[in-house]
Amino acid sequence: MASFKELVFSGVQPTGNLHLGNYLGAITKFVALQESHDCIYCVVDLHAITVPQDPKALTANIREVTAAFIACGIDPKKHIIFNQSQVPQHAELAWIFNCTARLGWLNRMTQFKEKAGKDRENASVGLYAYPALMAADILVYRATHVPVGEDQKQHLELSRDIAQKFNNDFVDSIAYHGFGDAFFPLPEPLIQGPATRVMSLRDGTKKMSKSDPSDNSRINLTDDADTVAQKIRRAKTDPEPLPSEEAGLEDRPEADNLVGIFAALSDIDKESVLRDFGGGQFSTFKAALVDLSVSKLGPIGSEMKRLQSDPASIDAILADGSARAEKLARRTMDSVKDILGFIRS
């Protein structure tokens, strides 16, 4: 098999109101990855329009995700940060993959069924076909690794199927053009330990979400230090002291959530947190969690606000990243066109 240079690709939807769950569940892992891999981080605005968007809000949300990447520690000079719509090869390769993927493969995608609901006939074609665009996002850079959560594993498997079918369908042409027996890599999932699942501060049985009507249910990355402290102090708890062992957190969802947040922000496990605070009152633990959360998240919120107050600087970072990404993507697309038999100037 052909050998490929290791490259990580990850895309984040510009949905706005990024919160602690997004930070601990994904962005901290992106920051860690840049120490060991070459990385491309994409704000996937083409994916966003598979459902209706307000144009002004979409613009703001693209900038917010970009600001979050930078404020959390991703270096846009060493790695590439850009928004998808500025690199036309994503859409170009997606069309070719629409002609490679099989209807039966897309029919098995559970996320379309969940997002479209009962009114599937009224869903956009884009919502149905966007797994082919997701494959193009990854493979237009011939990326070898993708950090994924549970909800994206099926889509990554489809990306591998599309890459394999393209390689098989055009094996002779691929070899003729000097790419050996495979042009596209089969991207691998990058699993970095158990994902941190952050729950609502008002109800430990529900996932932290931007759509919750109560702003006190979540810590937004743009919250200032005072707001972070206030939300932690008001977070729902129970009257019992913290247990000394992790098993004692069962059937105590709010306690489990706050201990999990402390562990994730400290980069330790829950058992270590309980060794320090087990048997003590929640008030003591909450005071420590307030100090920890403010020290970790306060600077992120401040930096995001600073960046967002100067949208031209964010746009310049996206323009630079897009230009660098487009060079890589154009190289792939030129080769794809040669392999397919297209004539190009």
Image (tube, rainbow, N blue to C red):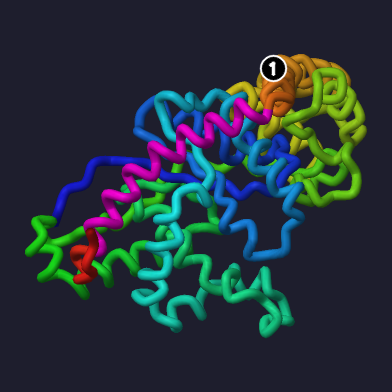
**Count the marks: how many?**
1
Q: Main secondary structure of the magenta part?
A: helix
In front: 154, or 51?
51
Figure quadrant of residue 230 = top right
Residue 161 horizontal/vertical position (percent) = 34, 68
* Mark 1 Cα shell of 10 Å, populated few (<14), some (14-19), many (≥20): some
In front: 221, or 141?
141
Residue at 37% x, 76% y is 99
Residue at 27% x, 67% y is 164
* Residue 282 counted in the magenta span: no
Please provide the residue range marked out in magenta.
Answer: 311-337
* Residue 312 counted in the magenta span: yes
Q: Is residue 292 visible?
A: no
User: Disc 1 residue type?
Assistant: Pro
In front: 44, or 338?
338
Residue highlighted by disc 1:
299
Position of the N terminus, as image quadrant, is bottom left
Question: From what the image shows, is residue 272 above or below residue 146?
Answer: above
Figure quadrant of residue 231 = top right
Q: What element carries label 1?
A: helix
Question: From what the image shows, is residue 166 above or below residue 292?
Answer: below
Residue 11 horizontal/vertical position (percent) = 51, 47
Residue 89 horizontal/vertical position (percent) = 40, 56
